[in-house]
Image (cartoon, helix red, strand yellow):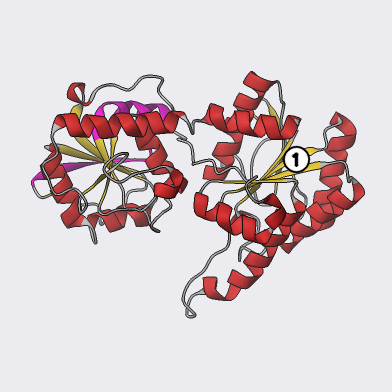
Amino acid sequence: MIQVVPALPPTTSGVGDYALALARVLRQDFALDTEFVVGNTEWQGADRVEDFRVWKLPSRSGSDLEAMLESIRIRTGSSRALLHLSIYGYAARGCPFWLLEGLRRWKVKQPESKLVTMFHELYAFGPPWGSAFWVSRLQRTICSRIARLSDTAVTNAYHHRETLERFDPSKRDRIPALAITSNVGEPSLSIGLGKRLKSMVIMGQKPLRKRSYERKKNALLEACQRLGITEIHDVGAVFDEIPDRVGEIPVTRHGFMGANDLSLLLSNSVAGFMDYPGRGYLAKSGVFAAYCAHGVIPVTPGDEESEADGIGCGVHYYSVEGNQESADLAKMQSIADAAWNWYQGHSLRCHARVFADIILS
């Protein structure tokens, strides 16, 4: 099979990391081998990543994409492609009409081919003074046309599934919504909170962590006090606004950590704090997934309203605003356990099984 991605390691890319992890499990569990097509012409990487063949497009053009897919089909016999769509990864302004054109040409030339699209993102939106406002309509057009062109659409949030069904009503009730997986490990067992250090992890992209320390600092301090936290571990790009202390609680700056080291840190920590932008989209957060996968108590400032994805406030995460009572160990352990159990139904192997069933059907 073919996987089309914006980039792969060594480039830092959540979508690329996910595609590579998925390829490993598809090969191991379902005997489905992957050849990658990288859509970023500036990507600097080898022609093999791990043991997977990688082809970089010579240019971002529909003709080059169609020719590349056809070349792989002739050589391998595979006419099954999984497109990982995060449109800013394929064009600076998030308007990759070349991608749409290449896929259209390939489908016309090879009508028996199968195109599965994983919609990691849809279209941007924002106020008129921001660039997102001006490209939103074009991005929406591209997403809707790729949705209709695809034999199967998959996404990572219930709200996105609703949008995709509006794009193509023929796919109603046939679009799987697969919550984001942890890209820093999936421990098979979760250590009880009573055996962990009283530490809080704050990880993720710089803007999200910065907001936690500035706009949500009161909620962060309140959470630490309720949970008896004695140390905060900051993981990710280092920036000046990371405080030395939150109240009286020291903050350790780790910078970027390898997946194994970060997995070990999470497995030995009680909680993880996050302020996700956009209510109702916790299923799209890799940080939330990592916390759940490691049996950490996910802590948010408020109610994230993610019930549509099966994520309940006070059940799968602890809300500072929504839970005013003291955080006793039994209650916190029930949240950590529920979060871990919820994740088991959204693990990487679950994703691979869904994609294998679609591709092989």
User: In this picture, is 84 found above or below 25?
Assistant: below
Q: Nearer the viewer, residue 187 or 169?
A: 169
Q: Identify the residue under disc 1.
A: 81
Quarter of the picture containing the N terminus is: top right
111 vs 85, nearest the viewer: 111
Q: Residue at x 18, y 48 (%)?
A: 323
Q: In the figure, is residue 156 to the left or right of 210? A: right
User: Measuring 62% from the left and 33% from the top, which residue is drawn there?
Assistant: 354
Give the residue at x 17% y 37%.
Answer: 231
Is 262 covered by the magenta stretch? Answer: yes
> What kind of element bears circle 1?
strand
224 or 202, which is in the foreground? 224
Rendering coords of residue 104 (x, y %) = 82, 55
Which residues are the magenta region? 248-270
Q: Is residue 322 above or below residue 261?
A: below
Q: Tell me the quarter of the image containing the C terminus.
A: top right
Residue 148 horizontal/vertical position (percent): 74, 56
Task: Mark yes or no: residue 50 visible.
Answer: no
Please, is residue 83 above or below residue 122 in the view? above
